[in-house]
Image (cartoon, rainbow, N blue to C red):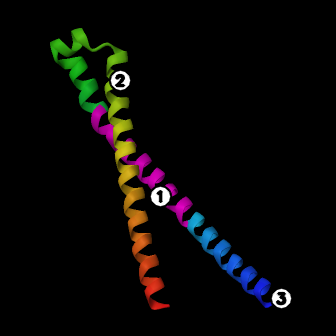
Amino acid sequence: MARNVAESTLERCNLASLDQKLALAKRCSHEGAMAGAKAAVVATIATAIPTLASARMVPWARANLNPTAQALIVSTAAGLAYFIVADKTVLATARRNSFNDASLSNKH
């Protein structure tokens, strides 16, 4: 009987720990997605202005960059910015959480 009580307590601790880890992972991915979206907006603006300006003013660009090419340039920069920043943010948050978990487990 005592063994069943100890096992159920251990299972509850493991489930609580698992729920906490799942919540941290969700928060970590949400932070990454938000940071990536912000970076994509900045990259879109930063690439759209010179791309559109050069397509109107530079003779080579006017002749060779149709609207599809211009959109491809802008969307590629936005996509790259999103994935790079989201990845770095998720990794940094996970690293920070792992150090916090290690310091908490050392105290107990």
Seen in the picture, residue 6 relative to 36 is either above or below; the reply is: below
Quadrant occupied by the N terminus: bottom right
35 drawn magenta: yes
Q: Give the dominant element type of the magenta stretch: helix, strand or loop.
A: helix
The span from disc 3 to disc 2 (Cα, nearest Å) is 67 Å
102 drawn magenta: no
- Please report the residue visible at 42 percent of the width from the left and 83 percent of the height from the top: 103
Q: Which mark is first along the chain, 3 or 1?
A: 3
Query: Is residue 44 in view from this perspective?
Result: no
Residue at the disc numbered 3: 1
Specify the amino acid type for callout 1.
Glu
Looking at the rendering, the stretch of residues picked out in magenta corresponds to 24-47
Q: Which mark is first along the chain, 2 or 1?
A: 1
- Graded by Cα atoms within 10 Å as few (under 14), some (14 to 19) or many (20 or more), the crowding at tag 3 reads few
| Mark 1–mark 3 CB contact (< 8 Å) | no
Name the image quarter holding residue 48.
Answer: top left
Taking depth in this image into account, of 43 and 56 the one nearest to the observer is 43
Secondary structure, mark 2, is: helix
Residue at the disc numbered 2: 72
Specify the amino acid type for callout 2.
Leu
Seen in the picture, residue 39 relative to 79 is either above or below; the reply is: below
Seen in the picture, residue 92 relative to 38 is either above or below; the reply is: below
Between disc 1 and disc 3, the foreground one is: 3
- Graded by Cα atoms within 10 Å as few (under 14), some (14 to 19) or many (20 or more), the crowding at tag 2 reads few
| Mark 3–mark 2 CB contact (< 8 Å) | no
Residue at the disc numbered 1: 31
- Report x, y in % for residue 26: 56, 59
Specify the amino acid type for callout 3.
Met
Secondary structure, mark 3, is: loop
